Image (cartoon, rainbow, N blue to C red):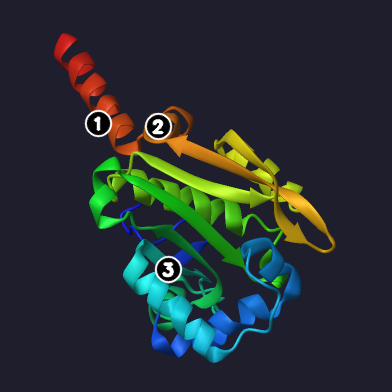
Amino acid sequence: MPIHPWRSARLVYTAIEAEDDDFLLSIPADAESYFNASPFPVVPQAKSDVAGNREYYRDKCLLAVKICLLAPQSSQDSATAATDAATSKPIPIGTIALSASDPKQVHHRNSGLGICILRQHQGQGYGSEAIRWALQWGFRYGNLHRIELGVFGWNPGALRLYERLGFVRESCKREHLWYDGKYWDLVELGMLECEWREKYGDEDSAVAGAKKSSRIVTKKS
């Protein structure tokens, strides 16, 4: 994990605040984004709905953050660019969350993952980057054993993405969802901590192992 636990290569992850309601409302305002993220009836979202979502993020999630781009830097000078980076405001492009377990089932250490990215920022790898960050956070900092998610049948691109990231297809609820005049499957996928470690590795362990090997070599020589 990077020294800064709320950043990845191109993104920064910040808290969801009350002043973010307009941004949160802009995500379901796009019909395609709404269809791909929500199984609820297709109705316009009001600010009161967004406030409810924000309360869900606060009270029902182990982790819930805005996915943000770092603001573009206006200077080529490294010192000035560093100052700009410290003072500029990140640009929100989506949200990602890991649901919290029911208090009576917290010992199972399971969580569901949900992500939304604004349409204009899709197709650029930001979703993959944010998911990998959330997996790392969940397994290394959240002490999770399993992370799961569901994919709607009308969104095969998301299914391919999640499988490419290492999620394992576990079940299919046939014709479980109604959308655009027909019933669609709900495909459920999951990832275990051991699968995450096998695919992505534990950077701390790798570094520690490298240092240990170096000490052994030095001692022998």
Q: Which residue lies furthest to the left in this view?
A: 219
Ranked by sequence position, the earlier of labels 2 and 3 is 3
Q: Earlier in the sequence, mark 1 or mark 2?
A: 2
Spatial CA distance of label 1 from label 3 is 30 Å
Q: Residue at x 33, y 54 (%)?
A: 101
> Where does the image place residue 83, in percent across and percent down from the top left?
39, 79
Classify the position of the C terminus by image quarter.
top left
Looking at the picture, does residue 51 appear above or below residue 30? below
Which residue does the numbered mark 3 point to in the structure image?
65
Asked if residue 15 shows in the view, the reply is no
- What amino acid is found at the position of numbered circle 2 in the picture? Arg
Question: Dot 2: within a 10 Å radius of its alpha carbon, few (fewer than 14), some, or many (20 or more) residues?
Answer: some
Nearer the observer: mark 1 or 3; the answer is 3
- Residue 73: give x, y in percent of width and height: 54, 76
* Viewer-side label of 1, 2: 2
Q: What residue type is labelled 3?
A: Val
Kindly indicate the quadrant of the structure image that contains residue 55.
bottom left
Label 2 with label 3: CB-CB less than 8 Å? no
Q: Which residue is drawn at 29% across and 37% down?
A: 204
Q: In which quarter of the image is residue 60?
A: bottom left
Which residue is more in the foreground, 74 or 39? 39
Tell me the tag on residue 141: none
Q: Position of residue 160 (x, y in %)?
A: 69, 41
Question: Is 179 rendered above or below residue 81?
Answer: above
* Mark drawn on residue 197: 2
Measuring from the top left, give residue 191's x and y in whole percent.
47, 37
Measure how far apart labels 1 and 2 are at the Cα level. 15 Å
Judging by the rendered image, the residue that carries numbered circle 1 is: 208
The residue lying furthest to the top in this view is 220
